Image (spheres, rainbow, N blue to C red):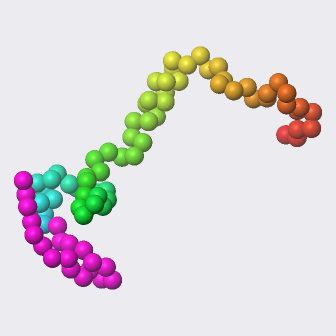
């Protein structure tokens, strides 16, 4: 476990802390992070995956299993289409 005590510092118009490279490396954090408050804690988590990474392959796999029948019809039985303009 890596423990660090530091002061909150003025950084421009904001306040922050300096995260030592050794701590960042020990946590395996590179690139982007997600920060959230939980009670009296601030949690910093590495973002290791791109959002939606792998979704295309999952959709394609699901599509190959589908019989392509629509869940809902384009036009409902009680819907008049005479006045529709395309």
Image quarter (top left, top right, bottom left or bottom right) of the C terminus: top right
Q: Is residue 76 visible?
A: yes
Q: Is residue 6 magenta?
A: yes
| Residue 18 location (% of width, % of height) | 18, 71
The reply, left or right, for residue 79 in relation to residue 28 is right
Residue occupying image coordinates x 29% and y 58%: 38
Tell me where residue 49 sits by quadrant: top left
| x, y percent for residue 47 | 29, 51
User: Residue 42 colored magenta?
Assistant: no
Up-down relation of residue 2 to residue 62 (above or below): below
Q: Nearer the viewer, residue 6 or 56?
A: 6
Where residue 21 appears, as percent x and y from the top left, is 13, 63
Give x and y (percent) for residue 67: 59, 16
Magenta span of residues: 1-19
Residue at the (15%, 53%) spot, across then down:
27
Identify the image quadrant of residue 19.
Answer: bottom left
């Amino acid at each position: 476990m890596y423990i660090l005590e530091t002061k909150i510092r003025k950084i421009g118009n904001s306040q922050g802390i300096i995260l030592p490279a050794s701590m960042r490396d020990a946590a395996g954090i590179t690139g982007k992070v997600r920060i959230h408050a939980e009670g009296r804690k601030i949690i910093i988590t590495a973002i290791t995956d791109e959002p939606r990474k792998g979704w295309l392959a999952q959709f394609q796999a699901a599509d190959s299993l589908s019989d392509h029948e629509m869940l809902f019809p384009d036009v409902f039985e009680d819907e008049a289409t005479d006045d529709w303009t395309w």
